[in-house]
Image (cartoon, rainbow, N blue to C red):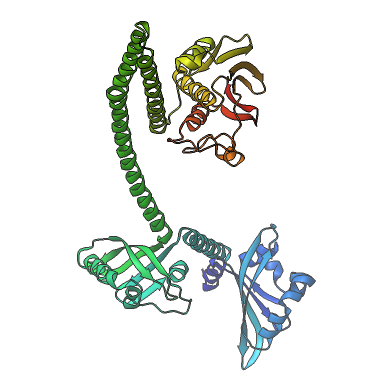
Amino acid sequence: MDKSYYSGRLVDQAPSMLAYWDKDLLCCFANRDYARWFGVDPDKLIGTSIKDLLGPKLYALNETYIQGALQGEEQNFERVITGPDGVKRHGLATYTPDMVNGQVAGFMVQVTDVSKLKNAEAALQAGEALMDRTGRIAGVGGWEVDLRANVVSWSDQTRRIHDVGPDYLPTVQSGIAFYAPQARQIIEAAVRESIDKGTPWDLELPFESASGRQLWVRTFGEVEFEDGVAVRLSGAIQDITEHRQRKAELQREQVLRAQSERHAQELDRLLSERSDMLDVLAHEVRQPLNNASAALQGAASALAEVGEQVASLRLTRAQTVMSQVLASIDNTLAVASLLAHPTPIQKADTDIDTLLAVSIADMPPGDRGRLSIERITATRTASMDMSLMRLALRNLLSNALKHSPPTSPVLIRVMDSDEPLALVIEVIDKGHGIQANLVPLLFQRDIHRQAGGGPSTHGLGLGLYIVRRVMELHGGEVQLVGNNADGVAMRLIMKQ
């Protein structure tokens, strides 16, 4: 076979579309890929005009490059064109003039399909953009040090963390200088150990950017060896300032929580001791006083039987004073108990008549006859803490008896309420009313009921405060519903 056979095969196997056009723009040669692109037989292309082959539209796009080649200038350009199969391809075209004796005899056309390369470049650019966006969101930037060429490369996110622009040329020394002074020795030692021993590092260090921002960064890196020689360092840097702040806040919260728990435990211990002391006080003080009061009552009755009226009267007075002391102690202990045990009370179904009877029995014997009950309800029981309600009602009755004329009656009215659904107990006296300036403060501690224009009373002022607290613990309330020169009306509302 002659050489033309082999040259023809080589041309046909070339990874490009090849053709030769003379100065009259007639085809003198085309390889198989070129002819296949235009959908014709290579032999039939010989003598074809380039204008006829390309057609008006494509020729117009290429005319500038054709004319440039005919003027002896090599033309290089890229274009996306659609082939006869309808597939768009990215072509890299070169028009090379054929110079004979200084004259252009024609030009060689070479078109290489670079679609795969362009797609790969696009994918790489998209991947780099994605990595940059991901790194920016996560606050992570990459870096690399070529130890042989002493060249440092930073990603865009790494530059953002350092607050430097794209023209900034980093070095190992300048990169370390961004770390806080106390951290530079740490990162330098980590880099040296990595190069000497191949040990990777992962550190959290204080950092100052080029703009003066005070940051915390996490820096991690590793070394790459070739033939036992360290040739490259690569790693990443992450802005963890916000993470460190949240971590510090969490630690502070944990410390505060631990302190609060210790304080709560100490408070529980103190409250427990306080409760124990109240129990001791109730037993060691109140019980002897009860015994003394009973003894006084017995002695007064015995003396009255034998005709010692004067001595009996004095003992009765002493018993009255003793009852007042006991009531004051009861109120003091009740307030201490209410303050020490603010937990929800335990309510039970309680007989209303029993509550009224024991509350009246708590009054001095000489005053019990002044008390009367008016029932406007058939309800027999209600949900309550019997001991606390007895204390509240006893304080209202004691106040009513004390602040009304000695022989005047005190009415206890029991009724229902539909809105809200509740049991209502009213205590109505015939006193002279309460001073207007005391009404807004009536149920606070250390506030005493005073008759209008009368002298001030003395004591701790706990009675009405206890009433309010007891009703609050029951989910109810106490109200002043009547206050004038003809008397005072207090109302207890126990929601059911």
Where 61 sits versus 444, above or below? below
- Of 118 and 483, which appears nearest the observer? 483
Left/right of residue 157 with respect to residue 432 in the rendered view: left
The answer to which image quadrant residue 197 occupies is bottom left
Q: Residue at x 39, y 17 (%)?
A: 313
- In the displayed structure image, the side of residue 35 where residue 295 appears, left or right: left
Q: x, y (%) of residue 146?
A: 33, 73
Q: Viewed as shown, does residue 221 lie left or right of 454? A: left
Residue in front for this viewpoint, 59 or 22: 59
> In the image, residue 426 lies at what x, y percent?
60, 21
Q: Residue at x 65, y 27 (%)?
A: 486
Is 428 rendered above or below residue 299?
Answer: below
* Image quadrant occupied by the C terminus: top right
Q: What is the quadrant of residue 89 in the picture?
A: bottom right
Image label count:
0
Q: Looking at this view, name the residue that lies furthest to the right.
A: 56
Residue 404 vertical placement versus 194 (above, below): above
Q: Position of residue 213 (x, y in %)?
A: 43, 71
Q: Position of residue 311 (x, y in %)?
A: 35, 16
Res. 393 in view:
yes
In this orientation, which residue lies closer to the viewer: 490 or 49?
490
Q: Nearer the viewer, residue 340 or 58?
A: 340
Question: What residue is rendered at 63% in x and 16% in y?
Answer: 415
Q: In the current view of this chain or complex, which residue is farthest to the bottom?
A: 102
User: Visible in this render: residue 49?
Assistant: no
Please say if 72 is above or below 449: below
